[in-house]
Amino acid sequence: MKSNSAILWAIAIVIVILGIVYFSKPGPEAPATPMEGEAAFEIPDGPIVLGAMDPLTGEGAVYGIPLQNATMLAVNEINAAGGVKGHQLQLVWEDSKCNPQDGGAAAQKLIEVDKVSFIISGDCSGAALAAATLTEPAGVMLFSAAASSPDLSTAGDLVFRSYPSDAMAGRVIASYVIKQLSVKKVAVISEQTDYAQGLRGSFTTASKEFGAEVVGDETYNTGDTDFRTQILKLKSVSPDSLYVVPQTPVTGVQILKQLKESGFKAVILVSDTMLGSDTISQNKALYADVYSPTPELDASRPVTKRFLDNFQAAYDHAPEFPAYMAAAYDQVYMLKDAFEKVGIDQKAVRDWLYEVENWPGALGDTSFDQYGDPIIGYHIKHVVNGEQQDLGAYTP
Amino acid sequence: MWIIAQIFINAIIAGSVYALVASGLTFIYATSRIFHLAHGVVILFGAYIFHFVWVEQGLSPALGVLFSILGSVAIGLLMNELVYEQQRKRHAKRLAYLISTIALLMLGTSSIILIFNTSLKSFNIQTTVYRFDQLNITLMQIILIVISCFLLLILSAVVKYTKFGKAMRATSDNDEVASIMGINTRQIRRLSFGIGSLLAAVAGILIGLEFNIDPNMGVYLAIKGFTAMVIGGVGSIGGAIFGAFLVGFFEQIAVWYFGAGWKNSIAFVLLFFFLLLRPRGIFGLKRFR
């Protein structure tokens, strides 16, 4: 009897504590921003703290660190010029390691421990998709500069990106190789990650639509280093063109090497993850003759020129992944403009972003479609013996 | 036809690496009766040290090989002295060894990540490609196969013809009787860990040069080496080598017919069937328990 009442007491206490915790939590709705007028909102005193996640270690660091540098360049510029209406921007960095597990953990930490309302990320698609499953229910805005998987379009209402979706990239390169280079049989080799599978999907669908035959479709696991059997299989179906879609350039270079060793003959296409200037200059012989779709920076635009010049001045070298990095630079300025216009309420910022038209960014004039994806055109890059050539804008 | 021949060549390349791993494991198992799965990280340390000395420090590759061998042997010996011998002193059961070797494997992988970080390391060397009609093989691959065969031959000769080999086989048969007969079994175990780890360093260097290295490879190498050892017949070096080529061959077949997702699981499938149908392996002795 005695132990029974003890249990009842314990349960009652637990319920009371849970109740207190539940009701003491602030409601999910932040105080509504008053409509109309510039001074209708107030930014609380002190710095504006934003969450930031990039792959800072591991293979993804090849672009994670450059993206972090581009983001910090924008943040430092804004802070040096007086911040956002007098408030300094402050970033809390987390390492997403370019995989869903660590991406989810990074987002969770930023949401629950640092209590941020905005997360900017220069992340791999897998990490960003995992983060989106946490940010969306928490009412946190996720703004990505590099995650390009088509799946991110529908990942949530508060999910935006400043880099275009791969739904377009796969289509652009398929159209180019089939219509301009008169290729009939295409093949693809892709890594088993969200990013690579997204591109693989848009490329194969578009290839069939443009009348080519997809004769080979091989995949490999992250961490694999031996691709000989896949290459052998691709060789046996003799495609006219092969699209190489790795998550990171290190693996991509290994594939190019083994393709070369096997005497593989076809038009080689690569994804934009392989366009790092360092990677290309270190492997000139492997980048003998490859094509890739990428948004191209137009240095004649004042914003773009400012980004390129300031980056060179700050880091003493040109941006390694210009398109991704311009997107990372843009996203900080875009948020700054939004904060100055509508305050730091996520929903107000979302509405502002949907409404912007031809916002002048380093990557190009940016408008968002209904999914929060920017509408930006692609160029075709042709790399010949390590030299990058721009073949101009291309629309399928 | 050329496709089958090329698959065969690819299988031999992978197989000769696995053979080095499996024979190192067998060598260690023979004297200590431990399935030394942490051998996987000893291999990785060899590869990482080689990469560090040659690529990151820019020293000569010969120095890289030297440091790599010294490092791996030191790590192998330390594992034996600090963990296995301590357990042996306390008359540990076999299961205890198995648990501690798995712990060492995980500890080793984490240490590699801490010291060398998670990124894939590449040597980025390209050697001449020899083509015979549609078939091709690179100079690096030929070197890999030759070195591995050469080492394995030496190893078999050592076991068969030297006094140490005799003492080793005696220890392997029955270590109590061997020590009564005046064989210092502890010393023999040390030697076999040393030689096994030396093979590991060579395997690591070759794997690095041919396939690149990443910190999670240790686990897969240990599993593939272990599978090769069980398939061939535990305790038989010839068996381990045969088993290694079988694993290499089935891996390539798996990728060809079922896709790359099956590549790493095929070792488990093989292991399962052998444990079920022929637990003592192809060349295994009947008296092996």
Image (tube, coloured by chain):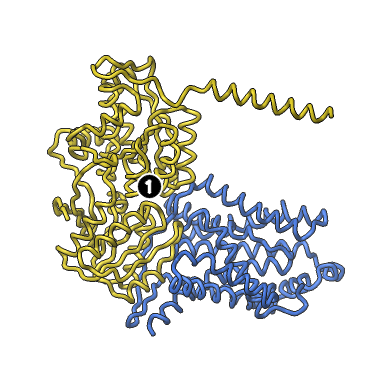
Chain colours: A yellow, B blue
Q: Is residue B81 above or below residue B141?
A: above
Question: Residue A376 vs residue B128: left or right?
Answer: left
Residue A184 in which image quadrant: bottom left
Location of residue B111 with respect to B16 vertically, above or below: above
Q: Residue at x 37, y 53 (%)?
A: A247
| Quarter where residue B180 is shown | bottom right
Q: Which residue is mark 1?
A: A125
In the rendered image, which quarter is residue A234 located in? bottom left
Q: Nearer the viewer, residue B61 or A57?
A: A57
Report whether residue B212 is seen.
no
Indicate the position of residue B40 as horizontal and vertical percent values. 59, 59
- Horizontal and vertical percent for residue A292? 24, 56
Residue in view at x 57 percent, y 66 percent: B224
A369 to the left or right of B7: left
Q: Amino acid at mark 1?
A: Ser
Task: Count residues near mark 1 (Cα–Cα under 10 Å), then give few for <14, some for 14-19, many for 20+.
Answer: many
